[in-house]
Image (cartoon, helix red, strand yellow):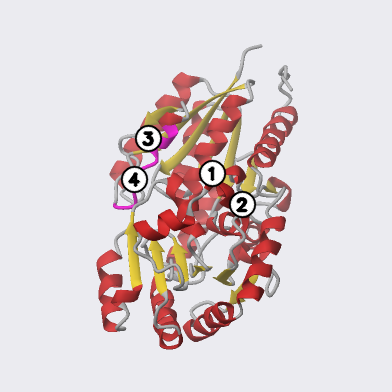
Amino acid sequence: MGKIKVLHIITRLILGGAQENTILTAWGLNKRGCYDVELATGPPIGPEGSLIEEAEKRRIKIKIIHHMRREINLFRDLLAFIELYLLIKKGEYTIVHTHSSKAGILGRLAAKIAGAKIVIHSVHGLPFFDYQNRFLNYIYILCERFAALFTDKLISVCDAMARKAIAAGVANEDKFTTIYSGIELEDYSNSDISIVEKQKELNLDQNAPVVGNISRLFDFKGHNYFLEAASLVAEVFPETKFLLVGDGILRESLTRRAEDLKIRDNIIFTGLVERIEVPKLISVMDVVVHTSLREGLPRVLPEALAMAKPVIAFEIDGIGEIIKDGINGYLIPPKDSRKLANTIIHLLQDKEKAKKMGEAGRVMVVPDFNLEVMLERIGDVYKESIIEKGYVLKWRH
């Protein structure tokens, strides 16, 4: 028997954790020899940047779904559904594996109607969450319950996401498997990175503290709380630089906020950066801060820990599964800018403590966040699903 045909579907290939996970999954499975993987996605519209070229560099076959957009538009969504249906019907894929909310709903429905043998969905983050309108949450829950009816397996990037989905009645526990997002750990080795070179590029004083945040400048990423904390930290360490890595629709408003807080000179907006630059940017940070108000388990956390950096993060969703409070970082109540500031100050004052936390974090990311481990576990889910459906296939090991 030939290779097993797999189609991954994601709404947009913009710069983001779910998108990186999807690309690495498609690329890694292709390399295993028993899969023929393609990737369908909408156009990477928006200021967040594109990963289309990254996918193409890894020789992933890309199918553009021209009407797929993140925003809800019934007419455009119908056209995107038709595009997906025709693609799946023509491609005769054994497995259709969806990612993100819009692609997850449209893609799974299209796969079911087109006759795909196996339908799998990865939960990188739930569309319903605490800081959103209740009615909208209710609609999203109904959509997820509906799509789960014809989903064979649900892969969650953390246990917390699975628990929330089960509690909301999306699906029963036996449909869920937790698989942490794998990263290419060798890219996050300080030995191959020139910290001094990156400091010069950013015009950083080698002795000045650097506190970093890596995320799209987008709603619910909590950048306002980061800036509020930064203003308090600057009162104690006025030479501190705060590095915001990423871009998005909030760039102008965050710049104005920094000016209002009188810390604009302390803030460095890097704008969009290539994925290869992320380890270099982490290398110059003394502390990595994550202030998102909704998240599955952000990739930047294991990336920072792999580089032996202490992390301070709001305690939401799956973050507590990797950040162990007081061991490899600190967990802060969401929106608590003052406690966030005090904790940053504490780590900047106690460099030995920060170093020990970083070293503890580096040990903890292996093996759970190793790319090969993720690929092996996803492959196991595929095999289990096929066996449960009664299909007989020859597997290459």
Residue 370 forms part of the magenta stretch: no
Q: Residues within 10 Å of mark 3 (few under 14, many from 20)?
A: few
Q: In this view, does 198 lie above or below 378?
A: below
Q: Residues within 10 Å of mark 1 (few under 14, many from 20)?
A: many
Position of 246 with respect to 178 (left or right) is left
Distance, label 1 to label 4, CA atoms, is 19 Å
Looking at the image, is mark 1 or mark 2 nearer the viewer? 1
Position of 275 with respect to 69 (left or right) is right
Q: Quadrant of residue 97?
A: top right
Mark 3 residue type: Glu
Tag 2's secondary structure?
Answer: loop
Looking at the image, is mark 3 or mark 1 nearer the viewer? 3
The mark nearer the N terminus, 3 or 2, is 3
Residue in front for this viewpoint, 93 or 22? 22
| Residue that numbered label 3 is attached to | 53
Q: Do the residues labelled 4 and 2 touch (CB within 8 Å)?
A: no
The mark nearer the N terminus, 4 or 2, is 4
| Residue that numbered label 2 is attached to | 157
Q: Are marks 1 and 2 in contact (CB under 8 Å)?
A: yes
The mark nearer the N terminus, 3 or 4, is 3
Residue at the spot x=69%, y=47% of the render? 177
Q: In the drawing, what numbered circle is on residue 21? A: 1
Q: In the drawing, what numbered circle is on residue 69? A: 4
The mark nearer the N terminus, 3 or 1, is 1
Mark 1 residue type: Asn
Mark 4 residue type: Arg
Q: Is residue 55 above or below residue 167?
A: above
Distance, label 3 to label 1, CA atoms, is 15 Å
Tag 1's secondary structure?
Answer: helix
